[in-house]
Amino acid sequence: MIEAYFDGACEPVNPGGTAAYGVVVYKDKKRIWQQSKLFVPMRGREKETSNNVAEYSAFLSLLHYLLDHKLNEEKIIVYGDSMLVLCQMLMDHPEWHKRYRIKRGFYVGLALQAQMLMWRFPKMEGHWIPREKNTIADELSKAELIRAGVQFRIQLAS
């Protein structure tokens, strides 16, 4: 079984700050991959960043890793603290689909990319967890911001 954790952050302001993400993947309880990166917007769109952009960047990174390593057919449980991503991509509940439907914002293009890949993951499910239980992915995302010299105003660095 695959378990994956993802997180994103945007500092020192949201939206418009520097966005970064972290992802960690376990197979049979053994860590097999992790990644953390800054989200780099297209030239001329440097301020089109947000927590949701960072969260979706993490989720897309996870999907691509799983596809590249042919793990998409396995049972996959994804954990994150983004209700938006989880409800839009993995949690099937009529009220949540209504409340969390893809509307507008800088994240929409990333959400649509992820949505187009989801059919390739027949055994994937998602579970919301509080930030305090998403420690490794949270630390990975914040480490990228720290390396970039970003000052934290919204969330304290771990």
Image (spheres, helix red, strand yellow):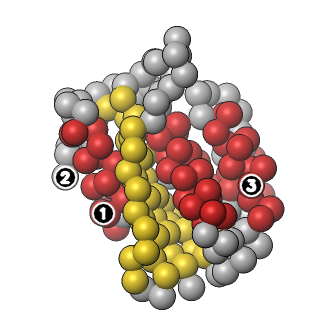
Residue 76 showing in the rendered view: yes
Disc 2 secondary structure class: loop
Q: Is residue 85 above or below residue 10?
A: below
Q: Is residue 86 visible?
A: no
Q: Residue furthest top?
A: 44
- Element class at badge 1: helix
User: Residue 135 — which label?
Assistant: 1
User: In the image, what residue occupies the spot 34% across and 67% down?
Assistant: 133
Image x and y of residue 64, in percent: 61, 56
Inspect the image, locate mark 2, and give the three-letter code of the amino acid beneath it: Ser
Disc 2 target residue: 158
Could you say where residue 63 lies in the image, as x and y percent from the top left?
Answer: 62, 59
Tag in front: 3 or 1:
3
- Kind of residue at disc 1: Thr
Quarter where residue 39 is shown:
top left
> Nearer the N terminus, badge 2 or badge 1?
1
The Cα–Cα distance between marks 3 and 1, rounded to whole angstroms, is 26 Å
Q: Nearer the viewer, residue 13 or 92?
A: 13
Q: Nearer the viewer, mark 3 or mark 2?
A: 3
Bin the neighbour count of mark 1 within 10 Å (Cα to Cα): few under 14, some 14-19, many 20 and up. Answer: some
Which mark is first along the chain, 1 or 3? Answer: 3
The residue sitting at 30% across, 63% down in the picture is 135
Find out whether the residues at labels 2 and 1 contact each other: C-beta distance under 8 Å. Answer: yes
Residue 113 sits in quarter: top right
Q: Quadrant of residue 154?
A: top left
Q: Earlier in the sequence, mark 3 or mark 2?
A: 3
Mark drawn on residue 19: none
Q: Which mark is residue 117?
A: 3
